[in-house]
Every structure is written in C-alpha cells, then in structure tokens.
Image: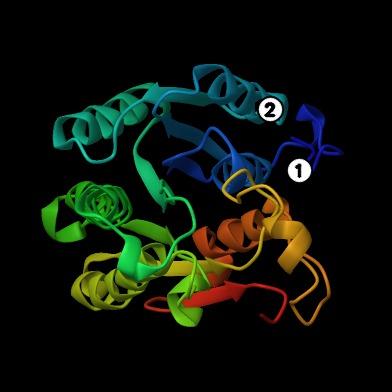
Amino acid sequence: MTLRDDVSSGDQVESNGTALVTGGSRGIGAAAAIALAADGWNVGLSYRTQADQAAAVVAACERLGRKAVAIQADVVDPADIERLFDEVAAQLGPIGAVINNAGVISPAGRVAEYDVERLERVLRINVTGAFLVAGAAVRRMSTARGGTGGVIVNVSSRAAVLGSAGEYVDYAASKAAVDALTTGLANEVAEEGIRVVGVRPGLIETEIHEPGRLDRLGATPPLGRPGKPDEVAEAIAFLASARASYMTGTTLDVSGGR
C-alpha cells in the first residue's frame, strides 16, 4: 500500500472519471487501483472473498482524494458482472476504464498431470471471465451503443510468451488467450471509441507464487530482480490514460527483460 504514498489529498489532480479494477483486493490489482486513484480516477474494484483487503485498498484510494468502492463479485457469473458494472457506475459515475485483472493459478505441475477440474478452473476464470468482463465493458462504453468510449486494459503475463514449462502451461495458455482478446477486440471496437491494450507482467512480488519460487527465479531477469506490483501498476495507469491515446491492440511487457 505504499504506492505514491507521498501524494496527499492536497495534491489532487482533476478527475479522469471512473475506473473499474477486477480482482482489485491484492497484488497487481490493488496496486493498479491506487495508481489510478493517484492519476485522478475514482476507482471501483471487485473482490471475490477478501473483503478486508478490498476495504484497505478503498481507504488508500480515498486518502488520495478520490472516491472508491469495493463490490463483491465473481467474474465468471454474468449476473454478478452486470451488477458490478451497474453498482460502480451508480456510485461513482460512468466507467471510462476497465482493468481486466482477475485471475488464478494452480500448483506447479506438468501437463501430463493436469486433470479436467484444474483446466476448467484456470480457463474459466482467466479466459471466460476476461471475455465476459470485456464484453460488459464494450456494451457500456461503445459509441455505437450510446456510450462515450473508454479503455480496457487486459492483464496478461509473460508466461503467455515463455510457456511456463514444467509449472503452469495451463496458466500460460490462458494468458495467451487474453493476448488474443486484446488484439482481436481492439480491432472490433476501434471505431467505437474504445481502446483495448494489455500488460504482461513478469516475475512480480505477489502472493501468486508458491513458497521459494521468487527466491529461485528472482535473479533470472536481465535486471537481476523480481518486479514490484507498483511497477506494473504504473504501466497500467499509463495505458488507461490519455497519454496512451494512440495505443490500441498492443501489450506492454513489464518483466525486467525476461
């Protein structure tokens, strides 16, 4: 929660509107919510079970002088997604940016060991959930549907490129699907006032890693260390902003060169 902790409510910037961050209670999602608040966005965030952590993120955003709200929602439940978007818009105003971040990973293992339950869980949350959230965003943002435009930032992973052999090939495949969503959807909605971009984090210090993994791999990027959630959050805030107004259909790597 230290992201931009030198920014006080007295340093407020003009509001950019409302941003929605899925999976915003911890890790990259939490850091992104705070970075967006520091950039002038009011922030709605979703969480599935971690209400206390989500409340802490809301408080951090509010300390930056922005409005914020946390809504419990499951990103693979279409009714929950509709309620999430409607409640955030009702409390904070029309949504202009969606950070499509919610995702899961399973314990490390080889493909030959995967069972149907594991595959269905990873692909349902990481792929189906990402598509459902993106679709809900388009229905509200598209100028062809009466919206005023906006931006969708899909959170992928360098695993989508590297494959994550011997550990998380299913997770890598799910994030490769997210990359395809970024490319394809960007072309679908470019004329409807919506930009679609992505970010591919590398080894980042979050709770997603199994014990010892960062110790084992943290020095392998060319920069010689794992990244911090704040460093990914800064890229997300940039992509969501007018500073990236001529960017769509592309994904930024934030991976220390790995």
Q: Is residue 258 left or right of residue 216?
A: left
Q: Residue 173: where, in percent of width, then height?
A: 34, 70
Lower sequence index among marks 1 and 2: 1
Residue at disc 1, secondary structure? loop
Q: How is the image coloured?
A: rainbow
Q: Is residue 125 left or right of residue 57?
A: left
Q: Which residue is mark 1?
A: 3
Q: Amino acid at mark 2?
A: Ala
* Tag 1 near tag 2, CB within 8 Å: yes
Q: Is residue 36 left or right of residue 160?
A: right
Q: Residue at x 28, y 39 (%)?
A: 75
Residue at disc 2, secondary structure? helix
Q: Tell me if residue 113 comes above or below residue 107 in the rendering.
A: below
Please tell me the numbered disc located at residue 60.
2
Q: Depth check: 212 or 61 in front?
A: 212
Q: Is residue 195 visible?
A: no
Q: Tell me if residue 188 comes above or below residue 78 in the rendering.
A: below
Q: Residue 139: where, in percent of width, then height?
A: 17, 50
